[in-house]
Amino acid sequence: MGAPGAPRRSPGAPPGGGSPSPSSDSGGSGGPGDLYDLLGLERGAEAAEIRKAYHRLALRTHPDKNPGDSEAPARFQHLKRVYAVLSDPARRAAYDKTGSLEDAEDLAGEAFENLYRYYRGLYKAVTADDVAAFEREYRGSAEEARELRELYVKHAGNMDRVFAWLCCSRPEADSHRFCDALEAAVAAGEVPEFPPFRAWAAQVRRRPAPKKDPLQPGASPLPGAAGKGKGRGQGQGKGAGATGGGAALSLAEQIRGKQAGRAESLLASLEAKYGGGKGKKKEKKKRGGPGGAEISEEDFARAAARLQKKRKSK
C-alpha cells in the first residue's frame, strides 16, 4: 500500500515506475476518467495536484530520460495534451462531460464559440413570429392538402385522428373546409370514402360554417398564440392580446356563462316538473343577459325543497 497522499499508479503504467503508455487514454473510446488515471489522480483533484503530477510524469517520460525508446516522444507529447486539457478549466469541464480528449481540445474556448456561432447562423432560434409565419404559409397550401389526404387514408376516415396529426389544424375552424376538400377528393377518385368520414361529414353539414374565412390572417390563430392590439373576446382591453391576458379573460367569461346557463337550466327543469307553470314564468324573468343570471342559493334551496316534498307525497 502506497504512502498516504501519494498519487496512485496509473493502470497503464508499467510496474516499477516505468513510463506510462500513451494507450492508457484512448482520447474518446476510453472511460471518462482515463486522463485522470494517466496522472494517477482522482477526478476531483485540485489544480495544484494536477500540476505536480504532470511535472513528475514529465520528468519520467521525457525522451532524454528514455534514450533508445522510440515511443518516448509520442508518450511525452500525449502527456502534454493531457495536461493542457486538465489544467484549463473550460477544457477540463468539456472533458468531464464528454470523456473525450479530442472533444475537450476542440469544444472549448474560442474554437467552441466559433463553432457555436457557425451553427447558430445555420439554425436560428425559432420565435413566435416564425411560428405564425409558418402557419400563414402552410394553411391552405398544396402541402396541407396533400398531407390531409394522406392522413385521411392512413386513419381510414377517422377525422379526430386526422386533426390530431395534421399541423396547424383546429376542428372548430377547419372542419367545413376539410370536409369540402375531402368530398371533392372522393368524387375525383383520389381517395376512398370511409364510413367514419361519412358520419363525420353529416355532423359537420348540420353545423353552420364559420362566418369568417379561417384562412384569413388572424381568423383562427393557434391556441395560446398572442395577438396584437385588441383581442377577439368582448370586453378585452387594449393591448391585452399582446400578453394573452385578454384571451384568458374572455375564456373565463365564457366558462362562467356556460356554468350559469347550466345551473339556470337545471332550476327551470325542476320548477317546470315539480312546481307547475310558475317555474317557467320565473325562469323567463330571470334571463337577462348574454350569459344568463347566476342562480341564487335561496332559489336552489326552494327548488330542492319542492322536489323533496314531491317525492315524499308519492
Image (cartoon, grey):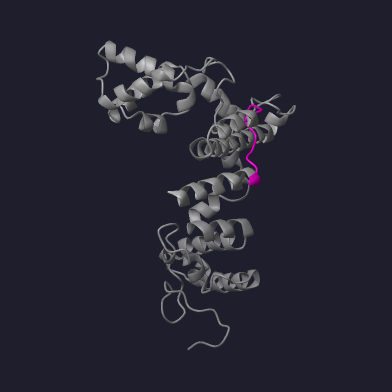
Q: Please count the marks in the image.
A: 0
Residue depicted at x 58% and y 83%: 5
Q: Position of residue 55 (x, y in %)?
A: 59, 71
Q: Is residue 32 left or right of residue 94?
A: left
> Was residue 294 drawn as part of the magenta stretch in this picture?
yes
Magenta segment, prevailing SS (helix, strand or loop): loop
In the rendered image, the residue lying farthest to the top is 188
Range of magenta residues: 288-298
Relative vertical location of residue 34 with respect to residue 301 in this rendering, above or below: below
Please state which of residues 148 and 115 is positioned toward the viewer in this rendering. 148
Judge by depth and name the residue closer to the eye, 164 or 232.
232
Residue sitting farthest toward the front: 313
Residue at 47% across, 78% down: 9
Residue 216: x and y, percent?
55, 15
In the picture, measured across the screen, residue 121 lies left or right of residue 179, that is: right
Q: Is residue 222 left or right of residue 162?
A: right
Whether residue 178 is visible here, answered yes or no, is no
* Image position of 236 with respect to 179: above or below: below
Query: 267 or 206: nearer the eye?
Result: 267
Q: Position of residue 273 (x, y in %)?
A: 48, 37
Name which quarter of the figure residue 265 lies in. Answer: top right
In this view of the protein, can residue 7 be seen by the observer?
A: yes
Asked which quadrant contains residue 165, the reply is top left
Picture coordinates of residue 176 (x, y %)? 43, 18
* Residue 80 magenta-highlighted: no
Rendered view: 90 above or below 11: above
Determine which quarter of the picture holds residue 299.
top right
